[in-house]
Amino acid sequence: MMASGNGDKNQLKLYSYYRSSCSYRVRIALNLKELKYEYKAVNLLKGEQFSPEFTELNPIGYVPVLVDGDVIVSDSFAIIMYLEEKYPQHALLPQDLQKRGINYQAANIVSSSIQPFQNIGTLKYIEEKVGPGENLYWANHHITKGFAALEKLLKGHAGRYATGDEVFLADLFLAPQMHGAIKRFNVDMVERGIQ
Ligand SMILES: N[C@@H](CCC(=O)N[C@@H](CS)C(=O)NCC(=O)O)C(=O)O
């Protein structure tokens, strides 16, 4: 069950699952901003996201959830924006507005047009309603489509990282998604020229 920590009310707490790409985005933000936090493990494979204790924090039953004193924020994009405003060190958004727009767009391609299609609940549903193994074709299709769009979008903006030589918002969404695509779904990123 969810591990409880030392109970310090002022310490940031992150409810996370180690293989969750959405939680991974927030862990990168917390680390770049050098913020200490208490790690609260939620085992998605054991269904801990559906426990009353957890859905009290996030009614839809997804990780990540950030608790900062009396403030509770769910959804990686919302959490990262909250962190950006409250803890401005190591800015995650570029000053240049065009670049900023590209960062929002890339992050949202990952969070709206790729990850929801490969979420545990979605994959289980497709497997049950469509047929055994169909969920992997489904996930692969959406991941490949999303990365093809990202490749076009970022052409001309990328440097060492997605939108130049500094790590910004887009990278926080891209890195975990690429990791998952390669390790969990065997998508060939080299052939796509993405790696
Ligand atoms: N848009 C949300 C999506 C959250 C989400 O889908 N989380 C996944 C892990 S990456 C989850 O908790 N899945 C549990 C389930 O499907 O039951 C975010 O970015 O935080």
Image (spheres, grey):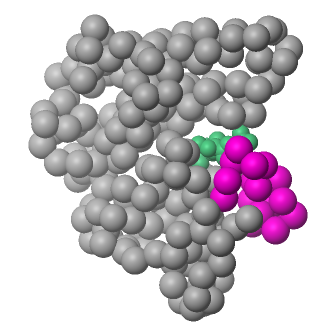
Residue 181 sits in quarter: top left
Horizontally, residue 166 falls left or right of residue 71, namely: left
User: Which image quadrant for residue 29?
Assistant: bottom left
Question: Which image quarter has ligand 1?
Answer: top right
Q: Position of residue 56 (x, y in %)?
A: 82, 66
* In the depicted structure, whether residue 166 falls above or below residue 156: below
Q: Is residue 101 among the parts visible in the rendering?
A: no
Q: Residue at 32% of width from left, 41% of height from top? A: 171
Give the magenta part as a residue range: 42-58
Q: Position of residue 73 (x, y in %)?
A: 62, 65
Asked if residue 91 is positioned above or below residue 142 in the image, the reply reads below
Residue at image location 12% in from the left, 43% down from the top:
165
Q: Position of residue 123 (x, y in %)?
A: 71, 25
Left or right: 89, with 48 as reference point: left
Position of the C terminus, as image quadrant, is: top left
Residue 92 lies left or right of residue 111; in this view the side is left
Residue 113 in the image, given as x and y percentages of width and height? 56, 25
Q: Residue at x 76, y 26 (%)?
A: 124
Q: Residue at x 78, y 49 (%)?
A: 47
Quadrant hosting residue 164? top left
Label the magenta part by its dominant secondary structure. Answer: helix
Magenta stretch: includes residue 86: no
In this rendering, the count of numbered labels is 0
Residue 194 appears in the picture as rendered:
yes
Task: Indicate left or right for 184 with 127 as reference.
Answer: left
Report the quarter where the N terminus lies.
bottom right
